[in-house]
Amino acid sequence: MHSDPNLYDFWPYRDRPKITWPGNKKVAFWVAPNIEFYELDPPINPSRKPWGRPHPDIVPYSARDWGNRVGHWRLMEVMDEFNVRGSISLSVAMLDHHPEIIRACVDRDWEFFSHGIYNTRYSYNMTEAQERAVLEDSIKSVMDATGQRIRGYLAPALTHTERTLDLLAEYGFWYSCDLFQDDQPQPVKVKGDNRLISMPYSLEVNDVITYGIYHQSPRAYADALKRHFDQLLEEGAETGTVMCIPLHAYLVGHPHRIGPFREALRYITSHRDDVWVTTAKEIAEFYMANHYDQTLADIARRGDARPGTGFNPQGGL
Amino acid sequence: MSILPDSYFTYAKRHAGPDHDHYPASPIIDRTPITLPGGAKLGLWVVVPLEFFPLNPSGQPFKAPGAMQTPYPDLRHYTTRDYGNRVGAYRLLTLFGKLGLRVTFAVQGAVAERYPGLVRDVLSDGHDICAHGWDADSLHHSGLSAEVEDGYITRTLDAVQTACGYRPDGWLSPARAEGFATPARLAAKGISWFADWAHDDLPTRFRTEAGELAALPLSNELDDWQILINYTRPEHEWATQVADAADWLLDEAGRFNSPRLLTLTVRPYVSGLPYRVKALGDSLKDVLDRAGATGVTPRDLTRTLSA
């Protein structure tokens, strides 16, 4: 084990080279509905219990199923109202379990990225071959069902191995949502000549944390979203920032929560002169074409570039 | 050699619909509209659990929310919960009487046996009753033999029947905990509806090996325990959330031309406290004062499935 993942270099948030998003926008804004499937009776990974109570733990299970029967449609309606396309963090098995949801997302040209096969199967203890199988399943299954080549990844239930990011790069992924070190994208230090970036996601304005950990009220959440946006907009005048709202329909879709969220989304999308309302893949594509090399050069200029790659501080393959 | 077997990467239930056979997938936007009494657009279903929390819980297979917490004898939690059945429940009965709201009391067998007078008062005030398991330490789970679980169910139904004069056909499991076999065992004992699963906003049909149950929706996200105790939000924030929910659901009912349901569990030892009961009353009145809102009973809800 390492004391530092070495997946990225220190890059202080001052005097960075300017990022200007397409159309001279200051904030790249994306919304990430997590469309997940949690199994009623999943097999056990020795590193993490899937449910708190003995199986079947029907309270949280049925709450998540509610998201796929009720909450999803409510959230989708609100996103439609403000012309926001989702970038979906997808439990890939949802392609099989709920094709009706997948069709609705395809019809809206939403982006899919992989969030593992099930959110009850964890990456811990996987061999390289097993982890490769999950990535290959993800790429092929989404391609077969939607015609989309997935370019992004958020590890299932945020469970990783030391090789996860290297494998993503090798399989032609462009971005990972697994790192929370910045409000701008940054190159991830992976093996070989592959390029992978960290995409700003969020565990702070993520409804799982808002409701599950911080226990905020829905109106307080909406207020936090607005303030989060205001700050990133102000800073975005200097160099473009990224704001993501990660969501779970089984939480934000409840009737006591969706109204305040709708007001926050209305507020943010009313700033379209300054805000690029887009998807993670489009942000990644633009950043890699225009700012990837610029970032590396700036880090090198500051003397902050360290050798090696993720979990491999000495470098070498 | 991996410590994760190959079976961790095979997915036997990776097929259309849920990974169980109780009900098929059904997006709510595709449902046939339901009908509520009087053409109401918003049905308010309030459920009041009457629970008995033993002073000496086994805590198996887990401690129910509200169970004893300090070393034996945990008089503070025992009497706090008992306060609910002695005082809080009556405060709620008075409140519902003023509002003219008929609610559903979910009665545990141990409560019916110990406090039959409370059950009679609930009945004489015109409320509905369903069974709520034996007590808060008799949890249903897959480790129970059929004999033990059937015993819990029968003993509960017998006790509630003795107290209220009829055999309940509705059920809420203690801590909403079930084993895999629980729904079928309930159906086999004559239960026709239950409210353990929170997978929908509307009543749904729920298949079991012993026949079909009506699964009534009952939110876990907006009840007094979740908002006031678990999330430690103050009463006025709870009221705001209930009001926001009512606004949204009424609007949705109009847009989808199908009534919606606002479901709320209120516990006598939580909502029946002096500083909370008025806030609850104001909140319920605010919902019921809306055009198209009405209180609903289990029968109103199960009837939506008979079409």
Image: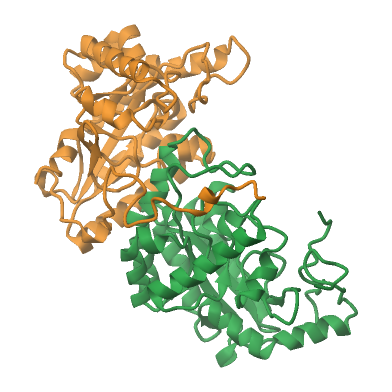
Q: Where does residue B115 sit, x and y in percent of width and height? A: 33, 9
- Quadrant occupied by the C terminus of chain A: bottom right
Specify whether B234 is left or right of B151.
right
Count the marks: 0
Q: Where does residue A250 sit, x and y in percent of width and height? A: 42, 53
- Tell me: residue B103, above or below residue A22: above
**Chain A color in figure:** green
Q: Where does residue A41 sit, x and y in percent of width and height? A: 45, 42
- Tell me: residue B260, above or below residue A273: above
Q: Is residue A266 visible?
A: no
Specify whether A267 is left or right of B260.
right
Q: Where does residue B12 sit, x and y in percent of width and height? A: 41, 50
- The image quadrant of residue B123 is top left
**Chain B color in figure:** orange
Instruction: Give me the residue at 77% from left, 67% from top.
Output: A310
Instruction: Give me the residue at 51% from left, 21% from top.
Output: B60
Return the residue nearer the eye: A56 or B49.
A56
Return the residue nearer the eye: A197 or A269.
A197
